[in-house]
Image: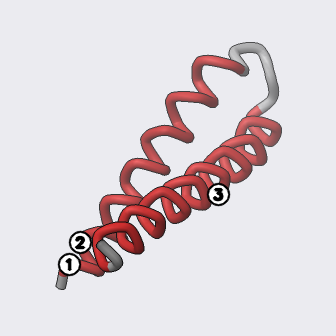
Amino acid sequence: MNIALTGAAIILLATLGGIVIVRRNSSEQAIQVKAVLFGVYFWGLVFLQLVVFGLLFYGLKHR
């Protein structure tokens, strides 16, 4: 169950972060460009969070 909650938290944070970054950085761009940028930011944030959570998990398990 903890893995599912962690995954849900990662998806939620990546979605909110992607929306915030797109709204802040691309005020005068077309909707299609904003959609593509959201995808890039979303997957970038997911990857970053997976690396951080993976390192934390590894560090906690191998103490």
Q: Amino acid at mark 3?
A: Trp
Label 2 CA crowd tier, 10 Å (few <14, some 14–19, many 20+): few
Circle 2 sits on which residue?
5
Q: Position of residue 37 (x, y in %)?
A: 74, 41
Q: Nearer the viewer, residue 45 or 26?
A: 45
Judge by depth and name the residue closer to the eye, 19 or 14. Answer: 14
Depicted 7 relative to depicted 10: above or below? below
Query: Does 22 appear above or below 35?
Result: above
- Helix, strand or loop at disc 3? helix
Residue at image coords 80%, 23%: 29
- For this view, does 30 lie left or right of residue 17? right
Residue at image coords 29%, 69%: 60
Q: Look at mark 3 in the image and give the residue it sits on.
A: 43
Q: Whole-percent x and y of residue 13?
A: 39, 48
Of 28 and 39, the residue lying toward us? 39
Q: From the image, tell me which residue sits under label 1.
A: 2
Say if mark 1 contacts mark 2, CB within 8 Å: yes
